[in-house]
Image (cartoon, grey):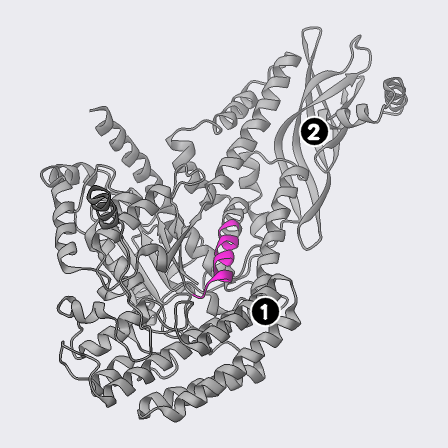
Amino acid sequence: MKHKIALVHGMGQHKENWSNAIQTQIKQQYAELQSVFTKDFDELFEFVEIRYDNVFDEQRARWKSQADDVLENLKIGGISSGGLEQIVKATQSLGEDNFFTTHILDVVLYKWYPLIAEEVRLNVAKSFLDIAKTTTDWSIIVHSLGTAVVHDTLQAMFTQSVEEELLPRVYRPSNIWMIANVSRVVSENQVYRSLVKPTLNIAYGLCEEYFNAQHEFDPIPMVKPFQSDKADAVIWKEEAGGLYLHLPIKGKNTTQINVHAFDHYLAIPSLFVPMMRSFAGRNSIDKTNLANFIAQYESTTVEGQAQSLKLKLEQINPKDMSSIEEFLKALREYYEFLTTIAAD
Amino acid sequence: MKIILSIVLIVASHTAVSAQLCPTEDTVLPDVYIQNADNLEVRAGITISAEIVANMVANNCFGSQTDIDSFTKKLLEKLQNATNSNDKGNVLELKKNVDDMLVDLIAYAEQQAKMTASVETAQVWAEFIHRLNTLLLTRDVSQADFTIGIGQRDDLTTKLISSYSGLSVVTRHCPESNLNPWQGDACVQAVKETIGLFRGLVLASKVIHAANLDTLNLHLVTIENRLKGYKDYYQKAEPLWPWESLFNTNVVTAKDKIQQGNLVGFREPVEYQWLVLHPSTALQYVSDQETDFKPALIVDVLGYNKLKWENNGSDVTSYGASAIVALSEFDGKTNIGWGMRFFYNRTYSFGITKNSDQVGLFISVGALEKFNNWNVDEDKFLKFHDEISTQF
């Protein structure tokens, strides 16, 4: 039984095999750092790709098909319905692929369409149970919107009673890596009061170790950030029993304009090294390889541009740090920023 | 020949191959640890021997397929049988296999406990045996946490007795020398005991995992049924427009159980839908118009659709009615009628509208297709329309 690692995506389009590049990146970085004291990646671990974007895509396709049907028949019948036709056309446009429909709409559907959110969670829960069925040891690496999805799915899975039986917590994941965590702003749940916390005692939490990584320049997890000094956060951390690790990523760790990207986070040594140690043990990394890995990474950072990037991204700085609307605004402005840079 | 050999060597150097990291015999230390001892990062307060044991545990050397231990091999065979029983849905056989394995594990633990020289390790074995016996009697797994380490596997603490550390037991009996870290009888004994303990813990975790597979299956089947239910819902329920889905939010969340601001379990399937300003099209026949069926825009101003779930939430039947407005174009004029629509499993939708003195009958395209397949006589339908018109 290998340690299975579930990879869960964030917002945006993620077709089948979306994780191939991420898997290659992790395996390659592991091999670059690997010491003689650890087995090869494939001997110890196995990736499992988790996908829920299909639920959003299918809903958009259903709305488009519904609108196509109405508009076509209106045309055949020569019927003019004025405003209603415009609304139907707007619904039809949800089937097109653009930043609003593939990114923002993912968040909107998850946050405000509970039936769709539930279908997302059921899909992810099925994947998690398929994993837990075949191994005693599994973990999760999750990005962006996926952090809320994973949180809510685990909470539902382990509180669901079937024929008066709860799912035993021996099937819980070992480590959860939350990257660019947006669970506090997107989830329906009160994440600091849920069961999804790392605990020593199996009775009190749903994982053993909980990591939270947030890049200084990334505006997406900035609204209601997971790490905060609020009273309930302090209680959560105390209950977590010392197995919680917050990884604030400094702005100098920037190698591309899209600082929010999954692969951008995973390339950062101050994130990847503790990740590898958490999975393969502290002696899995060779000292010389580590020095080379860091030097190689630093040679690719945009150090000179980091400051100007920071200034530009700071303009996105959300005013209200607690509202989902402000989160969506930040998301839109971030996309506009990326588009402007790409055009330049 | 030399050239070919060189090529083989170059290819080999680019393919990472793990060194032999696990012992081939209980007390034989693989060379890699001695040859690279200087590179091993040894935590403060422990010796290199303890770090090596921790490293082996992190590399799944004990209680796994690669373990050389004969008890492990036998237990893993039984575990495979248990998993096969579960895959066949034979819960009784699964439970029997699990009971057998628990008995074997208890016997193994008792044997190991007798051989141990360390008081702490003996205490962990005693707790281990106690919990497995309890498990055998009660099947209560709420306290059956045999996982190793606090987060990281190479931590070598156990959750059975929190004060126990395999690292400190080995450290106490093994020398600090890097040359041969497994020196002396006391050290070898401590290493053997610790390895035996962690092997037992890994195996116990696997048995407990198997012990509850029937419950896991129950949850898995429930989720699969819900997902099937979603497929059926999208085929048979009325297709809601974005604004209607928002309007129906309370319908979806009505039965939610909330504790401390958190949802408990998954949501129950919805039992009804509200239709609000719901546009769709249908083929309409209006009396006194010299034309066949023509497309009409039907707007359900307000409608109610009942959903009846069967087969553990995997199948749904839907039926409902709504108050409608129908728009159609005849002879360049827009006709607006009002009336009722009745629908069943989305495909079948029929309605009647009235516009001043005219009565319209309409049928959904899907239903018309079905009727055509059933060779429904159109003349009879028109006769039915005329009869209805006289009563309206």
* Quarter of the image where the N terminus of chain A is located: bottom left
Residue range (magenta): A123-136
Residue A281, by quadrant, is bottom left
Percent position (x, y) of residue A143?
35, 48
Which residue ends up furthest to the left in the rendered image?
A: A304
Q: Is residue B189 magenta?
A: no
Please say whether residue B40 is visible from this viewpoint: no
Label 2 marks a residue whose chain is B
Q: Residue at x 76, y 16 (%)?
A: B293
Q: Which residue is mark 1?
A: A165
Percent position (x, y) of residue A129?
51, 58
Residue B193: image tag:
none
- The residue nearer to you, when weighing B144 against B207, is B207
Type of the residue with mark 1: Glu
Which residue ends up furthest to the top in the rendered image?
A: B331
* Quarter of the image where the C terminus of chain A is located: top left
Few, some or many residues within 10 Å of mark 2 (<14, 14–19, 20+):
many
Secondary structure that dominates the magenta span? helix
SS at badge 1: strand
Type of the residue with mark 2: Ile
Q: In the figure, B250 relative to A244: above or below?
A: above
Please say whether residue A184 is visible from this viewpoint: yes
Q: Which residue is mark 2?
A: B324
SS at badge 2: strand
